[in-house]
Amino acid sequence: MATKAPLTVAAVDLGASSGRVMAARVGPRELELTEVHRFPNRPVRAGGTLHWDVLGLYAGALDGLRAAGRAAGRVDGVGIDSWAVDYGLLDADGALLGNPVHYRDSRHETGVPAVHAAVGPAELYRVDGLQHLPFNTVFQLAAARGTAQFAAARTALLIPDLLAYWLTGAVGAEVTNASTTGLLDATTREWAWELVDRLGFDRGLFPPLRQPGERLGELRDDVLAETGLTGPVPLVAVGSHDTASAVVGVPAATDRFAYVSCGTWSLVGVELEKPVLTEAGRAAGFTNELGVDGTVRYLHNVMGLWLLQESQRTWASSGLSADLAELLAGAARVPAFRAVVDADDPRFLPPGDMPARIAAVCAETGQPEPQSPAETVRCILDSLALAYRRTVRRAVELSDRDVEIVHLVGGGARNTLLCQLTADAGGLPVLAGPVEAAALGNVLIQARGLGVLSGGLPELRALLRTTQDAQLYLPTPGSAASWDAAEARLR
């Protein structure tokens, strides 16, 4: 590690349900993270279309940068990460052409046939290596084609790149998030121009690629005035896909690990040196998203805590208690495996009455329908643990990467019941934490880009192990047979 004096940096971390700004003091032997501002991320349906309130998110980021400056006295750098695939369109003057459409909007599915008519699914996978999801950016763009907004567009910026543009005026596409578009070559790590041309997209929509650690520019004078910060303040490209940052934030001691980045989505996989572009991987729904320092995040998207979050929303809107601690305590008293569902069932993707959908699937499969919120939560957690077990084992098989431990990071690391169930289901120790893995990964890449840290991922992760808390969960002896039986019910 370098021996420079610690710096204070701000990590803007945007999730699907909330955003926050974290201030971090970071040096060769120091990594301290403090949340200075949190703000809601509420999708808005207007005219039948589900949108992100991206201007609200930008305002929240500015408020957070102001709070970071007040809390720390100065800010030496800023980095932004967020969810993937969604984008804003800019016109020839650089103005935003409407609020970005939410990935859960049904419009995107209409783009799938058009894309597959030009490039078949197998060929597409050999280029981009992405798991088929109907909201991948390539399908979103195809669905938007023909609209007046799309005709006026000159640049497409993913959410972190859009905020970076407003903060600095710099236009670019950070490569880890660009890899989720379906229009990046997973092998060359460059835009797949032949694919872009075959799909009839204008090459000019896709800005120059940026690498994690690059300085994108400095905060504009009007941004400094708005936030009260003293310039110059560089904006550093981080792993701007929040999962890319979260995997940097995994405190792994060797490369023989799997990870579960557990939030609204659960991203479950292994870290590799090169993509796996096999037909078996495509059939299994595995994706090759690019990571920091030339790595590949070989993973499968599991529906994740969305199932629980949307259930809580439904109960709260009906006047029932949706307190998470109470729900988890109740779920712990419910016998295991009363009912399990496939967490990746596409019926669970849209917003709506999640408990009713889960009950309907249970009825279809001849299982008892959950009769209380506690039983629904237990069904969700058992089902998620089964999905994690299945995905880790498939990742090992497809990638030929041995796994000795599962690192569970993100908000789900607070869920002690889910962590223990994950260890029991997979038969592997689970190290839960850090909760703020995405923000920590953001901070580490900023600090290295600014010169206060040095080394590769092993050195950055060593700092995590000495400064961050984690909880070890060991598999319960004798539990394997019951999990095997539960898995068999889903076949």
Image (tube, rainbow, N blue to C red):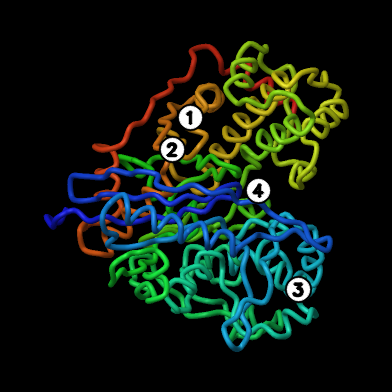
Q: How crowded is mark 1: few (under 14 residues within 10 Å), some or many (20 or more)?
A: some
Q: How crowded is mark 3: few (under 14 residues within 10 Å), some or many (20 or more)?
A: some
Q: Which badge, 1 or 4, comes first in the chain's sequence?
A: 4
Q: Work out how far the residue at label 1 is from the one at label 4, CA to CA, in angstroms.
A: 29 Å
Q: Which badge, 1 or 2, comes first in the chain's sequence?
A: 1
Q: For numbered disc 2, what is the local secondary structure? A: loop
**323 left or right, relative to 354:** left
Nearest-to-viewer mark from 4 and 2: 2
Q: Which badge, 4 or 3, comes first in the chain's sequence?
A: 3
Q: Which badge, 3 or 2, comes first in the chain's sequence?
A: 3
Report the residue marked by disc 2: 435
Q: What amino acid is found at the position of numbered circle 1 in the picture?
A: Arg
**Residue beneath the point at 43% across and 36% down:** 407
Q: Which badge, 3 or 1, comes first in the chain's sequence?
A: 3
Report the residue marked by disc 1: 414
Q: For numbered disc 4, what is the local secondary structure? A: loop
Residue 144's disc is: 3
Q: What amino acid is found at the position of numbered circle 2 in the picture?
A: Val
**Residue 395 drawn above or below residue 184:** above
Q: In which quarter of the image is residue 357?
A: top right
Report the residue marked by disc 4: 284
